[in-house]
Amino acid sequence: MNTIKKSIKLVLVILLTAAAVFGLFEFYPYLFAKTIKGVISKVERVNVNVSLLQNNSDSSNLSPQLFSFAVAIKTPDGEIFTASAEDRQWAAVSEGLCVTAKFFPYPPWKLDKAGTYYGARLIDSRVCN
């Protein structure tokens, strides 16, 4: 009876560990996302030579690269955060506006991109005081 309890506990520990590792790998960018508040230093549309061949007028199948932006935000302490974004909201803001944005980091196991951010999400924008 005692060995059955130990076996059940071992299986539970293994399952919980596997779930935690899976969650870390799958949701790393969301777990370690950073909220940045500051002034937009630069927002630029990334020029991608993309040819569109569409058979219909459905805009839902447009390439997200058409709406790619490079974003730089300067925080009050002088640090500048940069990220790439495929969020159309960045087209509506310009340099000098105060913004709050969520930056999602690449996981450290993506060695060529570790320590950088992608998917900058604009939360709000306003005129600076």
Image (tube, rainbow, N blue to C red):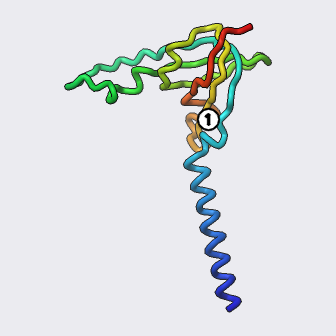
Q: Which amino acid does the dot numbered 1 rest on?
A: Pro
Residue 18, x across and y down, in percent: 59, 62
Q: Nearer the viewer, residue 77 or 111?
A: 77
Q: Residue at x 73, y 18 (%)?
A: 75
Q: Residue at x 63, y 57 (%)?
A: 20
Q: In screen coordinates, is 91 left or right of 19?
A: left
In the displayed image of the protein, which residue is found farthest to the right? 77
Residue on which the image places disc 1:
105
Q: Residues within 10 Å of mark 1 (few under 14, many from 20)?
A: many
Q: In screen coordinates, is 119 left or right of 41?
A: left
In the displayed image of the protein, which residue is found farthest to the bottom? 1
**Image quadrant for the N terminus?**
bottom right
Which quadrant holds residue 110?
top right
Q: Residue at x 68, y 84 (%)?
A: 5
Q: Secondary structure at mark 1?
A: strand
Q: Nearer the viewer, residue 122 or 118?
A: 122
**Image quadrant for the C terminus?**
top right
Q: Residue at x 43, y 15 (%)?
A: 47
Residue 8, x across and y down, in percent: 63, 79
In the displayed image of the protein, which residue is found farthest to the left? 55
Residue 119, x across and y down, in percent: 54, 30
